[in-house]
């Protein structure tokens, strides 16, 4: 646990330090040399825009460099070219002769662009251009101005497709980093909200934002997150999924140790609990950490409805998780090894339905489960209208044909259908996939040892869970280690007036989140 005993975030944790400044190619005082360097380095692409123009009484030479499609042409035309060429700011002789003075005048008195950075290396200028900004070079100056002009096309704010709610906000993250940070700031107007920017990837230079609430989050957690992200040393970390796999505690575990979400409200709620969010440019999925096994069964909708309804829904999800994991294995064990545990009438019904089936129960279950997984995968990859049709019609047709052919029994179709529906009830798609993987292992254990195999598999899963950690937090928290206060928002969602404190397992700097101090 955070803050108890030795540092749980890792005894070998290194102090986070930003990347050291690397000396790049210096900007030349000749705009022709700078232009040639950029063209040679980029290979003179067709979308490279180089606008050379003169300004002032002596026609001082300036060059504006940008990428077509990344930079907003309206900003370049109105706030850069229009402002430079329409004024009388170069009437003074001293400005007309000194390149540095011209650049300073542009920076402080002429350009109306909101964001301007003064750079001295070609690497910084090129990085700005490739990020959607534009670079302005001035003849006689060994510096350049990187102007904020990003204006590429992006998907608008839409309802999340993977986390639909009946009652709750309809906006979701998009692929634009600034849109995503804005959605969080709209909901959390706390001056202590921190969004630390980083760049990862040797070639992609992908922008990453680490969001947390200072004064709430455990400081060691933020340092550990930054330390792990700094270790990412690849050409292009492809989205948040790559980062999730890189910084996870155990790559051998099938359980997700970092939660991904498309919902800004879910991310904001996690930040106020003392967690950290990682926002990656180019993906609508934000990472939340650390998490526990209870986090994977909870939904944002639990807090938008009455506590009694939310508690019932959570109990149903825990039940669905159990059925999705153990139901086929239980059927195999009872039918193959423990027929005496089945009520007589039900046993006769099962025996009658299995009459003529040439395969044992385990082969039946594997055939149906594999078929279902193939149908599910096909439904995801096909266009949405066709995918839904394939999933429904394919399941009905194949199931009915298999029963009619005597390959599987009707009771097996029912068991597999209940298992599939139970997996759909879980709010976390990644967690549902984990249970699908574990289900096949438990089915094999039941086929070999019966109920003893199921119990053995259950014990092994629990041993793995209690030894698994997510950034220093035991994955089995608050079951083990036990935190009494955190049980108010676990299986039972207590009334909001009783949720006065942040999760104890997070060891937050500020534990109280509500003035009313009931439920201590």
Image: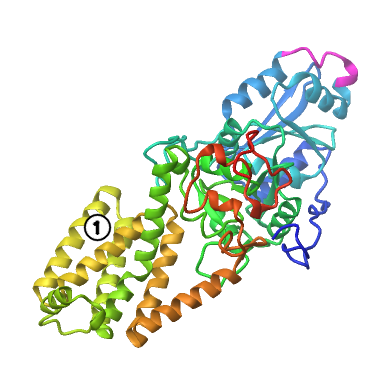
**Is the stretch drawn in magenta largely helix, strand or loop?**
loop
- Near mark 1 (Cα within 10 A), the count class, few <14, some 14-19 or many ≥20, is some
Q: Is residue 258 above or below residue 369?
A: above
List x then y, in percent, for residue 411.
18, 70
Image: 479 above or below 315:
below
Residue 505, how many percent across, how many down? Answer: 64, 55
Viewport quadrant of the N terminus: bottom right
Instruction: Name the secondary structure under disc 1.
Output: helix
**Of residues 243 and 494, the one drawn nearer to the viewer in this rendering:** 494
Q: According to the image, label 1 marks what residue?
A: 391
Which range of residues does the magenta coloring cover? Answer: 87-95
Left or right: where 356 falls relative to 37: left
Along the horizontal axis of the image, is 407 left or right of 51?
left
Q: Residue furthest right?
A: 94
Q: Residue at x 55, y 75 (%)?
A: 463
Q: Is residue 250 left or right of residue 405?
A: right
Residue closest to the eye, 205 or 492: 492
Could you tell me if residue 69 is visible in this image? Answer: no
């Amino acid at each position: 646990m955070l803050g108890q005993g030795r540092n749980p975030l890792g005894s070998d944790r290194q102090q986070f330090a930003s990347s050291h400044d690397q000396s790049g190619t210096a900007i030349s005082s000749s705009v022709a040399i700078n232009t040639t360097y950029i063209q040679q380095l980029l290979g003179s692409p067709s979308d490279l825009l180089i606008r050379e123009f003169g300004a002032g009484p002596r026609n001082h030479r300036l060059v504006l460099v940008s990428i077509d499609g990344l930079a907003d042409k309206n900003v370049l035309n109105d706030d850069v070219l229009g402002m430079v060429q329409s004024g009388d700011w170069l009437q003074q002789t001293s400005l007309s002769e000194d390149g540095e003075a011209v650049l300073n005048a542009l920076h402080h008195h002429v350009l109306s662009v909101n964001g301007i950075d003064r750079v001295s290396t070609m690497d910084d200028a090129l990085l700005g251009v490739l990020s959607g900004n534009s670079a302005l070079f001035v003849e006689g100056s060994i510096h350049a101005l990187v102007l904020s002009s990003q204006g590429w096309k992006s998907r608008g704010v839409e309802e999340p497709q993977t986390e639909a709610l009946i009652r709750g906000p309809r906006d979701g993250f998009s692929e634009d980093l600034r849109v995503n940070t804005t959605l969080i700031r709209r909901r959390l107007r706390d001056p202590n909200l921190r969004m630390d920017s980083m760049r990862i990837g040797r070639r992609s230079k992908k922008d990453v934002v680490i969001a947390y609430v200072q004064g709430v989050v455990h400081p060691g957690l933020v340092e550990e997150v930054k330390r792990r992200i700094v270790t990412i040393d690849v050409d292009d970390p492809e989205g948040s999924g790559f980062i999730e796999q890189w910084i996870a505690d155990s790559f051998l575990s099938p359980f997700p140790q970092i939660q991904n979400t498309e919902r800004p409200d879910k991310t904001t709620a996690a930040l106020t609990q003392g967690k950290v969010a990682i926002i990656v440019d180019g993906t609508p999925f934000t990472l939340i950490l650390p998490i526990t096994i209870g986090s994977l069964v909870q939904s944002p909708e639990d807090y938008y409805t009455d506590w009694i309804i939310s508690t019932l829904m959570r109990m149903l999800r825990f039940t669905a998780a159990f059925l999705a994991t153990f139901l086929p294995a239980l059927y195999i064990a009872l039918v193959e090894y423990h027929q005496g545990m089945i009520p007589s009438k039900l046993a006769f019904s099962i025996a009658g339905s299995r009459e003529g089936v040439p395969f044992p129960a385990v082969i039946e279950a594997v055939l149906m489960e594999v078929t279902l997984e193939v149908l599910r995968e096909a439904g995801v990859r096909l266009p949405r209208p066709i995918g839904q049709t394939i999933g429904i019609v394919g399941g009905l047709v194949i199931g009915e044909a298999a029963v009619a052919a005597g390959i599987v029994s009707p009771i097996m179709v029912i068991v597999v259908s209940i298992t599939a529906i139970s997996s759909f009830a879980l709010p976390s798609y990644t967690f549902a996939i984990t249970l699908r993987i574990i289900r096949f292992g438990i089915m094999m254990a039941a086929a070999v040892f019966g109920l003893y195999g199921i119990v053995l598999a259950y014990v092994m899963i629990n041993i793995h869970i209690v030894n698994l950690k997510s950034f220093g937090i035991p994955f089995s928290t608050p079951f083990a280690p036990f935190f009494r206060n955190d049980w108010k928002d676990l299986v039972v969602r207590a009334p909001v007036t009783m949720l006065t404190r942040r999760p104890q397992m997070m060891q937050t700097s500020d534990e109280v989140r509500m003035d009313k101090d009931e439920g201590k």
